[in-house]
Image (cartoon, coloured by chain):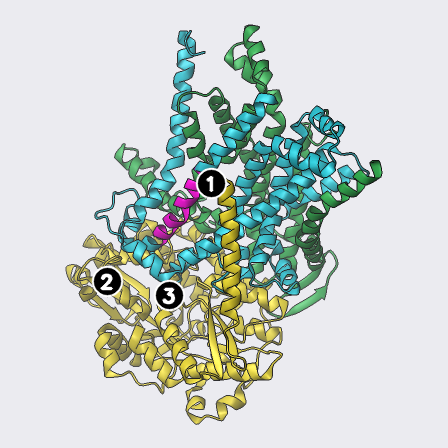
Chain colours: A cyan, B green, C yellow
Amino acid sequence: MKKHTSAGRRTAWFFAYLFMALCVAVAVFPIIWVILSSFKSNQEILSNGLSWPTQWSFDGYRQALEMAPIFQYFLNSLIVTVLSTALNVLALSMAGYVFAKKQFRGKNLLFSILSLSMVIPTTALLSPIYVTITKLGLYDTKAALVLVYAALSMPISLMILRSTFAGVPKELEEAAYIDGAGFLRTFFSVMMPCARGGIASASVLAFLEGWNEFTFALLLTSSGNVRTLPLSLSYFTSQFSFNYTAMFAAITIAVIPSIIVFTVFSEQVNASIVAGSVKG
Amino acid sequence: MRKKERKWIVLFLLPVCLLFVVFFAVPLGMVFVQSLFDYRLLPNKFEFIGFGNYAKLFLRDPKFLPVLKNTLLWILIHCIGHVALGSALAFVLYKKPRGWKFVRVVYMIPNIISQSAIAMIFVNMYNPQFGAVNQFLKAIGLEKLMHNWLFDMSTAFPAITMTWFLFAGYTTTLVLAQCLSTDETVIEAARVDGASGFQIDRLVMFPLVKEMIGTTVIMAATYMLQMFSMIYITTGGGPGSATTNLPLYLYSNMKSNNYGYASTIGVVIIIVGFLTMRIIQRIFGMNKEEVA
Amino acid sequence: MKTKKILSIALAAAMTLSLGVVSSTVFADEIVINYPTFQVGSNSAAPVVAELVDEFNEIYAGQYKIVVEDVPGDQNYADKIKVQITSGQLPPVCYGAGYKLLDMALGADLVVDITDAVNADPDWAAMFDENWEAVDCRDGKIYAASSESEKIGYFYNKELYEQAGIEPATTWDEFFANCEALKEAGITPIAMDTADGAWCTQLLLGAMIATSGDEGLEFMKSMYPTDYSIQPVVDAITRIQEFYTNYTTMDANGGAYENAANNFFSGNVAMICNGPWMIGDFSDTSKAPEGFADKVGVAIFPGGFVYDSPIEGMFVTKQDDPALEEAAIAMVKFFTSADAQQKALEMQGMVPAAKTVEITDAAKESFPLLADFIDQAAGASVSTATFTGGMVPGLEDLWSTELPNLASGAYTPEELCQILTDFATENAVTE
């Protein structure tokens, strides 16, 4: 495919690579900045954001771990986000499948009502959701965050999963029914595997939404056994004192594992997408 | 068979509907009810005033129009520029140039970092005294162009737009996934017919991923409609209300304990969002009955 | 993939199990006081609160137990308490700090009147002088007790002062002359900010208003003023605009306290207005260069002015269980006792709220700059609370977002004042 390159094509590729290089530069800049800052003194961070650290000291990491219960919060975050992602993707796959493949009365109306959730400003929901969670007796439990995060990612997952299931050829579903598979088995053993790509995309988005959420975590939890990682960042800046070094160290601690998980996971996503498309 | 299926359909929709009712519908109802009251904490007040808050917002609040304008403008910029950027990268990557996998993963990284960290980086870069932007201009002899980027009326809006504009990882990921899952024989056929790379992109690929682009446009629109933390950390909505959008205005009314009025803004956000979504769906021909 | 999934589920199960074990080991008849606080992490009062909680739990072992809930970030704390006020249930003990939480909680009828409990203890009752009454009492009833005082002047860099050949000013004319002299010596005079309520800037502004005459002083002494267009305020804001253009750093416009502080630590500016809690940072080598602490001097404002006011204190909220209210009162009493204030002074250099608390030699030795400042403050002739401290809710944010337009010259001082007046009138707190 790349053998017969004419001059015009070569320029096209040159610009393509240039574009890719720029995108990579834009994307790695913040993370490098964060990591470098975690080694600088507060003064260096505030006076010259772009400079190289004058000395590579791990003080920031030591202070970060001393000041805030980062590991515990990390574990909490992991549990809450994994469960909320699983709940979200399962519930929305079921709904997405039904919306994409089944006919029933009031389908369009129900779908428009549900997609309203996309445009509801979460800031306005703070107080009502707090009241609801307290009334349900879920204040300061992981379950509260799991449910709220599953709900928060609902709109995006609904969009993605509905269109994913819509893209699965009807013949596959019909073949399954002819083979005698019931509704449930058709869904789990035929439809779900075909929708892997979309499910993976939705999972990534739902995971990141939960992983970085701050306000509800602050509002709905109180004990260290439940609190999540984003809350730990406010330990380092209060009204009249600040420790940016420790804060960037904490951000680094928070973000490096997520990048690794994401990298590994996205390999999976791709493999499944490619595998899906062969048959598609 | 039919009856049995209906049972399953109901069962499959139940979890989502429950989530929706508990975490969206009920709270939303509460927000709407609150918007009909003069509800404050200090002095403590809870008085029914009908549509008084709405009348005040639409007719007598000089801040409302500029804030609405900012919100809509940002949505527009994001839906067009940001999605175009992300999709363009996806269209480059699906041809699998060397290193495409690397680029795809790396481009998502800024979306993994918490927004407050990104916001702080930009605050630092825009710092008029020490920031990289002004240092750079000084170094290349363009001292005249040096600015207090985030706090000058004329530059605040574009400066803040840049804090999220370039990070289009979501769009790239979703559009690319869709591109990759299309049937390669279609593209092969087009190539045999003598179509150029650009023609294939435009005539074959684009229609195939149009709905996914529509999805990312909707995501972009809702992202901007809900945008809060980035602005809050960088300019707080200032100078004046040059960078205030609807969610920020809602929050500032909550901070002044004017809960009824804040709820009114909440309802307006929902209406604006619903209309925006409808328009986008119409443009991309989405939400029609699927043709299988 | 599968093993990962199983692992995470097992992890979750293990976590929930261990949770159950931990929470069931609490004593049966011990009353638990859940205390959310922002005084954790990098907050300078964090070690004091931790120490006091430990002591309290030891003294009242078996009877009461404070369980601290970390709510890092002052604003996060205020936001959370406000949501809880709207839902009608507050933690047993709240800290008013600078967020008018007491008035809001009172408005929702959630606060316990502690007048009798205070009067039952002469030592405690003796702390309630007229300053305390203004902050912690409403309609002759005591609702809160303070533990810390907000006493603020400004710090200056002695080395830079020497270079310019100046001494701390006693009148505003001298102060402006000092700034001019510094500027001529190539030194930026003062650190200012606009973000987060423009803390340093509003201290300078308030000092000018309070010392401008009777009208200005009365304005600074009033809670929730609605008229910002009076002459003393307009005049002072005019001055502030001059400061932005002539006497401060480029990043003052848009900068937060951090930027202002960093400019002072780095020797970029000669002065910064701030309270004694900053003293510890002068010797923190991650923020300031080695030996910086020796270069810093402290002064009260020109016109013999100093900010001096107790910070709105801790209050007890209504609970279903009267025994819990009792426990909460015991906690507030313990945290605001003379001993506790003394401890805060000696540990972190926090200024005691009560005049009855003595500044010990131990404290003077560990915080010489603080001792110097408290001596000077004793000689001050005028004192008030801060400018933004008296604002109606929400105005501080508006002030912070409108100020850049004053700094850049987009607004005249009159225009800014009018904006503040309009908002304060619209959102007036009528008591």
Q: Secondary structure at mark 2?
A: helix
Q: Secondary structure at mark 1?
A: helix
**Crowdedness near tag 3: few (<14), some (14–19) or many (≥20) residues, C-alpha within 10 Å:** many
Residue drawn at x 56%, y 61% as measured from the top left = A141
The quarter of the image holding the C terminus of chain C is bottom right
Quote the CA–CA distance across marks 1 and 2. Answer: 49 Å
Nearer to me, A44 or C428: A44
Quote the CA–CA distance across marks 3 and 2. Answer: 33 Å
The chain carrying label 2 is C
The chain carrying label 1 is B
Quote the CA–CA distance across marks 3 and 1. Answer: 30 Å
Q: Is residue B264 above or below residue B104?
A: below
**Label 3 in the same subunit as label 1:** no
Q: The residue under label 3 is which amino acid type?
A: Asn
Which range is magenta? A247-263
Q: Please tell me whether mark 3 or mark 2 is closer to you in this view.
A: 3
Q: Which residue does the numbered mark 2 point to in the structure image?
A: C178
Q: Please tell me whether mark 1 or mark 2 is closer to you in this view.
A: 1
**Crowdedness near tag 2: few (<14), some (14–19) or many (≥20) residues, C-alpha within 10 Å:** many
- Point out residue C200 in the picture as x, y percentages from the top left corner: 36, 62
Q: Which residue does the numbered mark 3 point to in the structure image?
A: C43
